[in-house]
Image (spheres, rainbow, N blue to C red):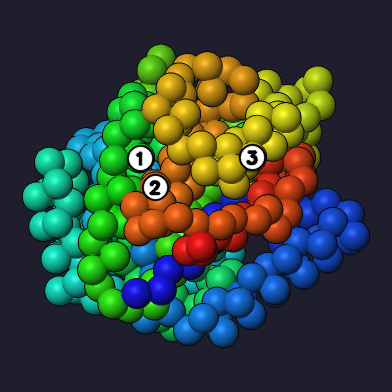
Amino acid sequence: MSIKLKCLSHTPLRGLNDPGADVVKEVDDVLARSRAEVEAFDPELIIVFAPDHYNGLFYDLMPPFVIATAADSVGDYQTMSGPLSIPRDTALDLARHILDSDLDIAISHRLQVDHGCTQTLEEMTGSLTRYPVIPIIINSVAPPFGPYRRVRKLGEAVGRFLAKLDKRVLILGTGGLSHEPPVPLLNGAPDEIANFLIAGRNPTPEARAARQARTIAAGKIYGTPESAQTPLNAEWDQAFMDLLIERRLDEIDDFKIDEISKAAGRSTHEIRTWVAAFAALAATGPYSARKDYYRAINEWIAGYGVISAEQA
Ligand SMILES: O=C(O)CCc1cccc(O)c1O
Ligand SMILES: [Fe+2]
């Protein structure tokens, strides 16, 4: 068994509403180095903990956790569309292991995934099909959310499964850090938006384009007084990254959902994927971690961070 971890922010505004060329190059370089490390590691399996943003999962039946035995990328923003290569039997074994661990998880035999899953997969591997991958979706965008300790337990259960596999495994977490893009809330939404949030699967190309345009427009004013969205919080992000690097995962059990939303933005909860990823790695033994990059990037609506870790 050999396990490595990478947690990265994602942002579909990369390439659509870029910061200055120097910052773009910094991030390009970090991603290129990370991808080269993945290439050298040559994983036999990737576990990607990812959020969904009302592309695959809706309030007609919103699961806290989902594991997929088959999935298609919807190709939102600039991501690739088409199937992921999921090892069906291993995914099912992992689902059984999680259930046997006293944790409930939904199983999808045909999941639609969005940029929240595929952007990082593409950035780290160059495609959706290069390596066998099992997506585990953690609800991070559609409240209410279960407590953070539950996410940590899910990660631990996955880690105990990986420890028995005797494979080179790459664990990915994708999303965060602090940020609040203009994703609507069901509570108080007008009918048209409520209908979308409840059952908006397979939108028209026009609806998809309108959503993309809305996100770009929000990126153009994010962090200015004109923006109604909670701004980035670099201090919060640094403290969270320090906690992971210093292996203080037990403190995550005290995370308060509403406080995080207020301090760092509603979509900050995408860090739930990082929590699961680190808990999985930690369940396999001691680890060492390093911060590869951090910058608060308003144009991308992202407290943009990259962390790598591996078994010590
Ligand atoms: O279309 C959406 O629902 C939101 C898009 C989006 C924008 C910035 C950062 C993100 O993490 C993200 O997901
Ligand atoms: Fe996101």
- In the picture, the disc for residue 152 is 1
Question: Which percent across, then down, holds residue 249?
Answer: 46, 38
Q: Distance from label 1 to label 2 (Cα)?
A: 6 Å
- In the picture, the disc for residue 81 is none
Q: Is residue 171 left or right of residue 79?
A: left
Front in this rendered view, residue 243 or 199: 243
- 302 to 81, vertically: above or below: above
Front in this rendered view, residue 180 or 251: 251
Provide the residue designation for mark 2. 279
Visible in this render: residue 192? no
Provide the residue designation for mark 3. 242
The amino acid on which the numbered mark 2 sits, given as a three-letter code, is Ala
Label 1 sits on a secondary structure element that is helix
Q: Are marks 1 and 2 in contact (CB under 8 Å)?
A: yes
- 19 to 233, vertically: above or below: below
Question: Which percent across, then down, holds residue 6?
Answer: 54, 61
Question: Which percent across, then down, holds residue 77?
Answer: 56, 58
Q: Quadrant of residue 135?
A: bottom left
Q: Quadrant of residue 48?
A: bottom left
Q: Residues within 10 Å of mark 2 (few under 14, many from 20)?
A: many
